[in-house]
Amino acid sequence: MEYYDLIIVGAGPSGSTLANALRNSGKRVLIVDKQTFPRDKTCAGWVTPTVMESLNVNLDDYSRGRTLQPISQFRIGMMGQPAVENDHGEVVSYGIRRCEFDAYLLDRVDSPKALGTAVKSVERDGGNWVVNSTWQAPLIVGAGGHFCPVAKLLGDGPGAHETVVAAKEVEFQMTPDQAQRCQARGDTPELWFCKDLKGYAWVFRKGDFLNIGLGREDNHKLNDHLNAFVSEMKASGRIPDDLPGRFKGHAYLLYDHAERPLVDDGLMLIGDAAGLAYTQSGEGIRPAIESALMAADLIWGLEEFSAQSLQPYGEAIARRFGNRSENQKAGFQVPNWVKMPIASTLMRSHWFTRKVVTEKWFLHQES
């Protein structure tokens, strides 16, 4: 049996960031993931300059051999009506490929890794957790996304108020002919809101790579909305009419509706495992990174990991992202005041699409 101070389940951005942040803490850290890296990850894939700065990513270094698409404009609309294009006059985000981004962050981690290893059992043995009857630690951190096995130790599934968003997307490298026919531009991601405002779709070009997807809160209508959107984009020439492969699905919780406890005795959740995706946009990379850094700040000085000693992490999350109990009545994606007949008018407004949709909901420039 190998002993560690903590075991991190999930080697995505939150897990690798936590492990890297604890590099010089003296803590013995093991990071476990069922996948080997680089691995395919369904995600539209953009990060703000703030995220890159918080990760201490050197952009020149990262861009060598990897996709780093500067974004300075957004094209936003409601399905069935013309889009509005806003130029922000500077780089406000970067397009990345998750297969490259996640591997880059994990490569910086010098802690032991058990990759390609599924977590089959987590059992309590005195004051420690035993994983796969092989490793033990007094603290286990769930960083494995919505279906993280550690999250199951804190609850049996989504609660009555939890909004589980289902999304489907495809990312592929376009042929020269497809790239020439595709009207979507790399510096201008496109966001298209469903008419009922229960979700949105996107077209995101990153060099010769194209990512197309749609996410909604009602899973049973997802395919219908996706097929209609793809057909509309093909007909208008925004995307090639010969898309390869199948759309892949994934799910996540919106922060204002998630009910998962974040800590318990020897347990902690970060990133999507904790249900931290922004409610208005569903974006989860920035909350994942920030939650990992908050967790590291606390773990650094702890000698024991009771629920009481870990509670300051939950309090820090509430201070940063708001009190969930006060926000559970809020709607998915957009506030209730937008869900009115004026919504289609607002989505044609340069001021609203820039100041509210892009800068507040998606880029979070006020926070």
Image: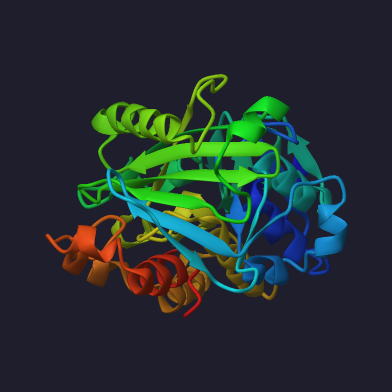
Horizontal arrangement in the rendering, residue 101 relative to residue 78 (left or right) = right
Q: Nearer the viewer, residue 142 or 215?
A: 215
> Residue lying furthest left in this view?
341
At 83% from the left edge and 68% from the top edge, which residue is drawn?
24
Q: Indicate the position of residue 324 as horizontal and vertical percent values.
A: 31, 67
Horizontal arrangement in the rendering, residue 79 relative to residue 68 (left or right) = left
- Is 20 located above or below residue 56 in the figure? above
- Is 231 located above or below residue 76 in the figure? above
Quadrant of the image occupied by residue 79 = top left
Quadrant of the image occupied by residue 90 = bottom right
Q: Nearer the viewer, residue 13 or 281?
A: 281
At 28% from the left edge and 48% from the top edge, which residue is drawn?
81
Quadrant of the image occupied by residue 37 = top right
Q: Indicate the position of residue 42 as horizontal and vertical percent values.
A: 55, 37
Q: How many marks?
A: 0
Is residue 322 among what the camera can see? no
Q: Nearer the viewer, residue 73 or 153?
A: 73
Q: Indicate the position of residue 58 as horizontal and vertical percent values.
A: 83, 65
At 72% from the left edge and 29% from the top edge, which residue is drawn?
176
At 40% from the left edge and 30% from the top edge, which residue is drawn?
235
Q: Indicate the position of residue 36 as horizontal and vertical percent values.
A: 73, 31
- Is 147 located above or below residue 107 in the figure? above
Q: How is the image coloured?
A: rainbow
Tell me the quadrant of the picture where the N terminus can be found: top right
Is residue 193 among what the camera can see? yes
